[in-house]
Image: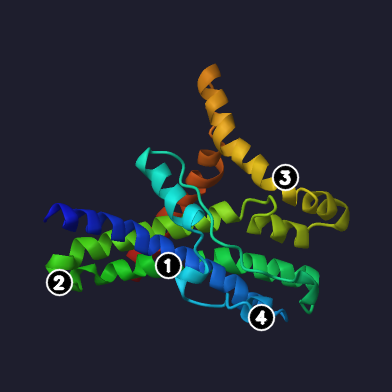
Amino acid sequence: MTDFGALLFGVTVWALPLILAVTLHEAAHGYAALAMGDDTAQRMGRISLNPLRHIDPFGTIILPGLLLAVGGVMFGWAKPVPVNFLRLRNPRWGMVVVAAAGPAMNLALALAAVLAVNLVPYVPEMGRSWFFLNLDNAIYFNLLLAVFNMIPLPPLDGGRVAVGLLPRALALPLARMEKAGILILLGFMFLLPMLGERIGVNLNVFDWLVHGPVEAIGRWLVRVLISAG
């Protein structure tokens, strides 16, 4: 394999499953919003399987690539699908459905990728490794997106699900955290581990909250694959 061929191989086995996972995650939010009564995403052209409509060049491609290159935490974002929750037929329940649709799509994609591993032996030998690595990364990225986004902190999907399900007395204070939520999240992901390294304590919250569940769900999906076989 030439240097260019090796580069192309490496880029595609990471970029394709990531782009597909992000695109279908965002499209699922838009389809759910439309089903629940809000056509904002449809009018703005965001209910689409065209990844260019959902990808944030820095948040979806550049930052995750840099973090992977230096062995850091896998982190990034796409352009959020616009949703007017007040236009939903039932704003509170509709918010739960719309927010949960993205992670649910990622779980479905991860399961589909696990089942598709059965097809690897039927792929021509020349493309077998490429096909398998795409599936392997698709499982990882989709589980990562599903688990990470279900952390119950606005503006993540899990935060909006929690706001919709909690009693009003608890939901309102949580909803007010939306503007500061991303800063809190970044602090937990990057600052706490740095502090932990200085004091000799493992404070890698990302490992506890995300990588652990991702590995557990991955093992369960492998058992599904074995059972299906």
Res 100 visible? yes
Q: Amino acid at mark 3?
A: Ala
> For residue 95, what is the image quadrant?
bottom right
Image side of residue 104 versus residue 165, left or right? left
In front here: 142 or 215? Answer: 142
Vertical position of residue 35 compared to residue 102: above or below:
below
The residue identified by callout 4 is 34
Which of the labelled discs sits on residue 180, or is there none?
3
How many angstroms separate mark 3 from mark 2 (CA)? 50 Å
> Compared with residue 29, is residue 188 higher up or lower down, i.e. above or below?
above
Residue hosting label 2: 124
Residue depth check, mark 3 versus mark 2: number of the one nearer the observer: 3
In front: label 2 or label 1: 1
Residue 20: mark: 1
Q: Is residue 107 visible?
A: no
Mark found first going from the N terminus, 4 or 2: 4
Amino acid bearing label 2: Pro
Residue in the image at 23% along x and 68% along y: 120
Q: What distance separates the C-alpha of mark 4 from that of mark 2?
A: 41 Å
SS category of the residue bearing label 2: loop
Q: Mark 1 packing: few (<14 Cα in 10 Å), some, or many (20+)?
A: some
| Disc nearer the start of the sequence (2/1) | 1
Q: Looking at numbered disc 4 in the image, what kind of residue is underneath it?
A: Leu
Expressed as whole percent of the image width and height from the top left, the position of residue 118 reads 28, 69
Q: Earlier in the sequence, mark 1 or mark 3?
A: 1
Give the quadrant of residue 159.
Answer: bottom right
- For image coordinates 29% across by 66% down, the residue present is 117
Q: Which amino acid type is marked by label 1? A: Leu
Mark 3 neighbour class, 10 Å CA radius: few under 14, some 14 to 19, many 20 or more: few
Closest to the camera, between mark 4 and mark 2, is 4
**Closer to us: 208 or 156:** 156
Local SS, label 3: helix
